[in-house]
Amino acid sequence: MNAATASNTDPALLGIEVTSFSTDSREVKAGDLFFAFSQPEFAENGFNGDFLDGTIFVPAAFDKGATACVVREDRFKAHRHELEDFSDRLIFADDVIVAFQKLAGAVYRDWNRPVVAVTGSAGKTTAKELTAHVLGASGRKILKNVKNMNNGLGHPMTVLKLVAEPDHDVAVLEMGMSTPNREIARLCEITPPDVGIELNVLPVHVEHLGSIERIRDAKAELVEGIKPGGTAVLNADDERVLGMKGLHYGPVITYGFADAADVRAENVTTERFGETRFRLVMPSGTADVTMAFSGRHNVSNALAAAAAASCFAMTPKEIAAALGTVAPPPQRGEVVRLDGNITVINDSYNSNPDALMKMVSTLVEGAPEGSRRIVVAGEMLELGGGEREIHKEIGARIAASGIDTLIGVRGLASDMVEAARAGGLEGAEFCSDSWEAGGRLSEIVRPGDVVLIKGSRGVRTERVLEKLLEVFKSDSVTYKN
């Protein structure tokens, strides 16, 4: 930041201690430092879409008690009439987003404690939550992203919490990307990981990156960004991830179901939805785990957390005990039980072909004998040029999976439904949005059914469950989280 370019800036301003930060004028609190992002910066930093110019909200931020505002000088000149009266409390930056990130990097360097970074095409948030929970069970205070604040804005905002709360012992940070703009590399520059977890490489965000190879390269930026001497935690069941071994010159821990994995699971069984058991096998010993998750993919996420925990000298028994007390994050495999012995698996946070089919397999394998298996699947977004064919392929695979009913939701899900019908699934139908799908599900669901709800964020399939709860009152619901 360059306060010197603002000739009217009060020199005393730079001596004021600031412990809270805001990027949304609606959420500004007294004493905040407000960062006014503008469209040029969003474009220059690889954010897709059109955004409001935060400069116009500077007066509102001051009205709410902001101590100072960081603005781009050319945006100040464009809005001089509205901002002139506040010029003594403005700090100018060539790029406000870059200034925001640099400030977070400086805060991290001053804090200087271990960082565990998590990335992958699917499962990032669940793996992050599992890792944070397991490490927290050892008595450490853990800083972690809220929800999926994992990009060039959410990540530094998370790190800046350390200004007011520096007593955290470890940061567990999810790192996401959706463009070829070296997003993960930039996040690693803010907080170089001591431990870097690579989950998987899947055809997600192909629309922006163009190929699975480019997705792999973008995810590999995390391994390349690990501190010298830090540890790479790699999924032995994903060839593209395992191939990243050569990018890191420090210790490597592999995890997965493969016999050669350093940390692996044996004897995996599912007693019922929301409960999985397995034996955790590590170089330091074994332990039995009972975990409130369903599906092999969540066992894999737990193994990633266990591998990371081993870097902090936690024993298999300590890790198993911690995994036994963790619950799924909302909308990520949470199990909702309704009156009438109806079970709903709410996995509404995101979707892609691999993640959808994993959850369908979880449904088919885990549903009690004699129960109907219903899948509510929203269209999958950001798949690139072959998106229609991908939806058709998934529809055919769902038809062959053994489920009884498919409700496709919105847009390209109609191709999924068409292919499922062609594959022999008579109980396949299409709804134009999630509210309609929720209404239709409420009409057809009956006692004993097991329902999977899965969709990309833009489809808002959580509304399917909301509609269902209008029929099955909230006091008849038990959340497994």
Image (tube, rainbow, N blue to C red):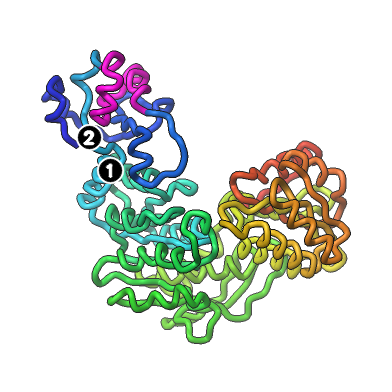
The N terminus, quarter of image = top left
* Position of residue 99 measured from the top left corner of the image (x, y, whole percent): 25, 40
Q: Circle 2 — which element?
A: strand
Left or right relative to 17: residue 198: right
Give the residue furthest to the bottom: 259
At x 82% / y 44%, what residue is drawn?
440
Instruction: Give the residues in magenta.
Output: 54-83
The crowding category of the residue bearing disc 2, from other C-alpha atoms within 10 Å (few below 14, some 14 to 19, many at least 20), is many
At x 38% / y 47%, what residue is drawn?
46
Relative to 282, say whether 16 is above or below: above
The residue identified by callout 1 is 98
Query: Mark number for residue 93?
Result: 2
* Position of residue 443 measured from the top left corner of the image (x, y, whole percent): 86, 44
In depth, the one of 302 and 40 nearer the eye is 40
Answer with the quarter of the image where residue 246 lies: bottom left
Left or right relative to 475: residue 104: left
**Which amino acid type is marked by label 1?**
Val
Relative to 339, say whether 21 is above or below: above
Determine the main secondary structure of the stretch shown in magenta.
helix
